[in-house]
Amino acid sequence: MALLDSPAPAGSGARLMAVLNNATVRSVVYQALTLACVVLLFWYLISNTIENMSQRGMSAGFDFLGVSAGFGIGFTLIPYREGDTYLRVFMVGIANTMLVAVVAIVLSTVLGLIVGLARLSNNWVIRNVARWYIEVLRNTPLLLQIIAWYFGVFTLLPRPRDSIGWVDSIFLNNRGLYLPAPVIADGFGTVLAAAVLGLAGAFAWARFARKERENSGRIRPVVLPVLALLVLPPLLATLLAGAPVSWDMPQLRGFNFVGGLNIPPSFCALIIALSIYTSCFIGENVRSGVQSVSRGQTEAARALGVPPGRTMRSIILPQALRVIIPPLISQYLNVTKNSSLAIAIGFPDLVSVWMNTSLNQSGRAIPIVAMTMGFYCLVSLAVSLAMNRYNRSILIRER
Amino acid sequence: MTDAVRGEPPVEMIGVNKWFGAFHVLKDIDLRVREGERIVVCGPSGSGKSTMIRCINQLERHQEGTIRVHGRAYGRDLRENDAIRREIGMVFQSFNLFPHLSVLDNCTFALTWVKHLPKKEAEDRAMEMLTRVRIPEQAGKYPLQLSGGQQQRVAIARALCAQPKIMLFDEPTSSLDPEMINEVLDAMVELAESGMTMIVVTHEMGFARKVADRVIFMDQGEIVEEAPPAQFFDAPRFDRTRLFLSQVL
């Protein structure tokens, strides 16, 4: 305000211009205007919604969550019965969505790494197969691919009585994939203890191998012994303790299979389509990451006589990861969000059971949409937070 | 083994030819390097000098001719090629340090994964070499935290750690700021005085005059002239050499 009080010889017009051209005044005015716009917009949206809803006798409350939903869900990861509440439906939807997301993320990462490295292969056949795999699959819509896998492959499989079977324990037919289900019996504790011991042993071996390398320079194999320590002890315990885990085998009874673990065709189609589609993008990320590491790095390692495998693991990949991780985060978020396309083939994910069935049945649009958006936001933020933290930990120190 | 090859020249190139596609980069190169000899290779850009020394440790494969290192020739046996290559250290124009490893880890990397030395021994040797190039105090830093001259000295220390019998330098000062060139050249002069066999591609004619036993001038893929520095600089025999010298001196 000192500006206004200061003796200005010029007229009031010039004084006004002086105020308007002041940096502080400008920034305050623009911020106030922006804030006012945002508040007004929200006030309009909210008051309008409340008005419309009260006219139609709808409620925005969350009281319906305790009410019984009263519809069945074809595939649930967590226990669910028809009489359970809407809240339970929400949980079932989240569990199914998370299952799809996690499985698809793991599969697409493994596939993507393979395809990405294959794309850089010196072998003409491998390089070109990988290239066409990527070009064809990433340039067609995901929804189309999901529908193609579902209607073009899984629903065209033979009827249960003509199932495709492997060693009488795994069956594939138009009702899905049937696997033997593990049933836990007495003595399972021994197996668990053996597994824990094996895990501890694996850690101990990895530590020992590192110490050995540091103390005597001797290089010991790590990958195979660790795998053996993880797999063999529980396996041996299972045999010695007289099979504390028995297998519930799927069996054909009449027109269908009973027993075992049934994975519905919609889940198979969704996982395969999502994993393959995403693996193309991850493959390209891997390729660009590896290519971003200068050729000089490989040459320096080669000049030092370092074997190619060690160069890839200790020199190229650690540097490539810096370039791969940020776009990988977006791919993981995409998988999670794209899993909502499950609705097209009737897999009961969150969008299907919650945004579709529950919303239609209860009419509580506002809370249901808000909860769904809240869930996807939360997952996305959590994934990107974790990945950003990891990314920061592998940054190269430059200053 | 080393006794059997004693007397064999450290590096011997006989009738070496190389093409990049249709481009003939190396034409009938014959070169014999004596034990402890310091050779400076110069010539206009694109004359094949870098390609020639990169052939010596097989970062580039030649298509015709023979390259022997202490009497052992490169061939189709990849393990033998690796074994031959370990006799040779190399320093690059762009340093090529591993940016995600500390200076010390850069130096110990090959000692750990190629020579299988215990960590303590590897680190002792790395510190010894870092002291030799006068930057032991930078051991804990990362390459990109150092100046260009310091990085190139780390690269020299890293190559020396593997205890090579021959050192190749591919334009080691070309990407340095002028005020940093001398610290790298000093390290190289010191190395030369210790009796290391060295082949240096460089435009530093002062270094050539001071250190080299023999200067080689290459143009268009051929060795045009080779002579001791005094004769090379003061009485070059060929017009091409004279033209080149008039441009760089």
Image: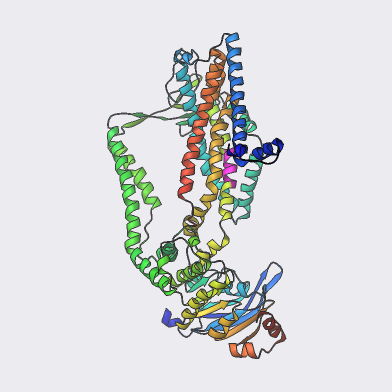
Q: Residue at x 55, y 72 (%)?
A: B179
Asked if residue B228 shows in the view, the reply is: no
Q: Position of residue A218 (x, y in %)?
A: 35, 62
State which region is magenta. A276-284
Q: Is residue A288 above or below residue A70?
A: below
B218 over A70 or under it: above or below: below
Q: Quadrant of residue B233?
A: bottom right
Color scheme of the displayed model: rainbow
* Residue A393 included in the magenta stretch of the image: no
Spot occupied by residue A217 in the image (x, y as percentages of width and height): 35, 63
Name the residue rendered at 45%, 59% in the picture.
Answer: B101
A382 or A192: which is nearer to us?
A382
| Left or right of A206 in this view: A320 | right
Say how many tags the image has: 0
Q: How far across and how far down the image is residue B184, in percent?
A: 51, 74
Magenta stretch holds residue A280:
yes
Identify the main secondary structure in magenta.
helix
Tell me: residue A33, above or below residue B82.
Answer: above
Q: Where residue B241 sits: x, y (%)?
A: 68, 84
Q: Is residue A121 above or below residue A19?
A: below
The structure residue drawn at horizontal position 71% and vertical position 83%, both measured from the top left corner, is B243
Does residue B85 show up? yes
Figure quadrant of the N terminus of chain A: top right
